[in-house]
Image (cartoon, coloured by chain):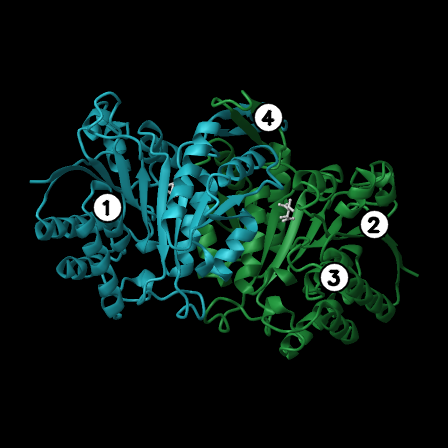
Chain colours: A green, B cyan
């Protein structure tokens, strides 16, 4: 009698639209594989909530989320009404930091049926995963301004790499590479230009590589690595990068294989366990890579697959492997069947969130 | 009787290979348009020089370069023998800083004949230019390490934006956008994640936009902007970004239109003038976007067009507009004629540096 309590935070914009079909897919999977979900849906962690309450979340947010097995997150942000640094740092980025979700895992695959902007990709299998450091680096949020409003005005922000922060994400990436058939790890760097933090990153990669002689390690500067994502995406396997570089690569990858609309993101704290009463429990968070997309919000045309695929990663994380497999298979077979009337506009179709979501739900 | 003194620094790797054909193209243009070049070729600013002398350059390098009208730079770097931070910060990055070459201008065009990895690009004109801040930002080189070698080890690097530094590159970009038919400026940011420096960049963009009501301004976070470079490169006109973001975008753009091998880079100090005896003269530097490419060095197959096109930008800068036009026309017509035997491998051909260079030279 397996039961999972899930905090559901639809957020803003298309987050509100892709969440309902995704929840139905999860329900369908639970039904088929004999377990139960309790979805606790909260309207906070959204700009809608902020406009009413002047804060992004109620003060007991941490308690409420820690009562759950995982967090299922839509998208947050509405720059027209609330500055991004308030909405993001008051929700998503805060969760990553507070729950120490130090791994951001983002698979990228070329799925038959999804039109890719790249020519001649049919002959290749593209199937890699980005492992992004998710708590420090360029997103330190420390720094400030001096001589404000004058011609000497100077603004400084620190990038912070810690031994623990770098090593744990590299460790995860090396282990993941080892577990995959290609056993290849690509590290994103920019040590030729960013001359203090990035050489440190490189050093830690080299150091850890000694423990993984079976993993083929390569290092590229972020500029040329972005170029290679376009020119030979099929050659990548596990790609590891800092908070910023991982962010860039995990949008670029799905853009190359077709659309960011299908890309999922798992924000993991892989060392916290609900069964370990000695340590504070810190839930992981699952979300689509895309944001709230104010430009298409309200039209009912957002691609629900990013949200559904994130649900698939949550199922994996919860240990429901068979259900996870069923969900990804359903996504694949619906996409392969495809058709202009089913695919959403980001996949060059005329379909709706609703109809694409239902098709996947039925397939499960 | 126009004569230009040019410091020629071939550098390392393929820099040594693409320089000779490029110099021949410049000579051809000079001959046709009735002016003269004096090329002062120096073997320093290279890892070859470093290995012999233990330094990247002779102590009077500044004097030698300031005696010239411009610097024509190949590529530097040989990570196998000299760490990048020594070779780059001891040459190219030092020049940018010391000569205050605060604009890095990098045009990106889809040129008929160059195979692009993007599908269906034939119907579109892709013609944009990246304006990269070239002296500060993420390339500050200030910061350091603490608790070295322990589990508390922490490495910090500062990103530094100054009012003057940001405003002058934005001013240049706005003026450039105003001068072009599309009058559109895209600003790269990441103010949702990098919460101190990037919001400042955005503020300065908004402030200056008020002075340019005729310029259409848009702002994108770097992650989604990279995705848009792949998905709709034809919609961009002038793209402005920080040192790091400009670096990334100016590799990604040419990768989308075909190859980094043809992309040029002008490192400009647009306010320094040789005629102004009151201020120190600071020459500008012209280089291909590609690096020294140790993997293909010595094979004679490097694409010489990046170097030649950089020469074209130098001609523009020197005021030789007709010669500049002739060079870009020659590049275009040779590429349009194309053919497997002429195009270098980065353009899916079997051609050599030598034969492609000669073809362009003859066309001029
Ligand atoms: C070699 C490297 C330091 C340099 C940079 O990042 O500026 C290069 O990538 C460039 O784009 O000119
Ligand atoms: C919304 C933004 C702060 C966020 C990030 O940069 O981390 C997003 O782009 C992501 O990739 O999850």
Give the alpha-carbon distance from disc 4 to disc 3, as whole Å: 37 Å
Question: Mark 2 and 4 residues: CB-CB less than 8 Å, in contact?
Answer: no
**Do the residues marked 3 and 1 share a common chain?**
no
Name which residue lies at 64% across and 34% down: A164
Looking at the image, is mark 4 or mark 1 nearer the viewer? Answer: 1
Q: Distance between the residues labelled 4 and 1?
A: 40 Å
Q: Is residue B118 visible?
A: yes
Q: Are marks 2 and 1 in contact (CB under 8 Å)?
A: no
- Give the chain letter at badge 2: A
Q: Dot 2 surroundings within 10 Å: few (below 14), some, or many (20 or more)?
A: some
- Tag 3 residue: A18
Q: Identify the image quadrant of the N terminus of chain A.
A: bottom right
Mark 2 or 1: the one toward you:
1
Ligand 1's quadrant is top left
Task: Give SS at disc 2.
Answer: loop
**Residue A190 placement (x, y as % from top left):** 46, 41
Disc 2 target residue: A43
User: Is the residue A358 above or below the residue B222 in the image?
Assistant: below
How far, Cα to Cα, is label 2 from label 4?
A: 32 Å
Q: Is residue B111 left or right of residue B133?
A: left
On whether disc 4 and disc 3 are found on a single subunit, the reply is yes
Residue nearest the viewer, comparing B40 with A135? B40
As drawn, the label of residue B316 is 1
Query: Could you tell me how far apart the alpha carbons at marks 2 and 1 are, in whole angstroms?
Result: 58 Å
């Amino acid at each position: 009698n397996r039961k999972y309590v899930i905090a559901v935070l639809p957020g803003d914009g298309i987050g509100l639209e892709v969440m309902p079909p995704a929840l139905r897919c999860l329900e369908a999977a639970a039904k088929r594989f004999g377990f139960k979900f309790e979805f606790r849906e909260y309207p906070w962690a959204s700009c809608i909530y902020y406009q009413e309450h002047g804060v992004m979340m109620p003060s007991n947010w941490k308690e409420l989320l820690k009562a759950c097995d995982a967090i299922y997150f839509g998208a947050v942000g509405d720059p027209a009404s609330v500055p991004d640094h308030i909405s993001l740092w008051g929700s998503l980025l805060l969760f990553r930091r507070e729950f120490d979700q130090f791994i951001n895992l983002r698979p990228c695959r070329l799925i038959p049926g999804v039109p890719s902007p790249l020519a001649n990709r049919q002959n290749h299998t593209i199937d890699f995963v980005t492992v992004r450091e998710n708590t420090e680096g360029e997103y330190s949020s420390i720094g400030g301004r001096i001589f404000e409003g004058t011609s000497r005005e100077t603004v400084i922000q620190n990038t912070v790499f810690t031994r623990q922060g770098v090593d744990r994400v590299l460790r995860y990436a090396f282990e993941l590479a080892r577990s995959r058939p290609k056993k290849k790890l690509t590290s994103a760097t920019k040590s030729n230009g960013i001359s203090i933090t990035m050489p440190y990153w490189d050093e830690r990669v080299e150091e850890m590589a000694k423990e993984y002689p079976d993993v083929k390690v390569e290092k590229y500067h972020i500029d040329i690595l972005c170029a290679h994502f376009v020119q030979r995406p099929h050659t990548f396997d596990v790609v590891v990068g800092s908070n910023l570089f991982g962010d860039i690569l995990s949008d670029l990858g799905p853009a190359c294989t077709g659309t960011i609309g299908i890309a999922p993101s798992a924000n993991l704290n892989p060392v916290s366990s609900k069964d370990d009463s000695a340590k504070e429990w810190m839930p992981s968070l699952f979300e689509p890579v895309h944001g709230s997309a104010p430009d298409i919000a309200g039209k009912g045309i957002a691609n629900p697959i990013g949200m559904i695929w994130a649900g698939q990663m949550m199922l994996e994380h919860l240990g429901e492997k068979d259900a996870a497999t069923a969900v990804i298979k359903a996504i694949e077979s619906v996409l392969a069947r495809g058709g202009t009337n089913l695919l959403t506009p980001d996949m060059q179709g005329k379909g709706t969130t609703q109809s694409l979501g239902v098709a996947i739900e039925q397939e499960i």
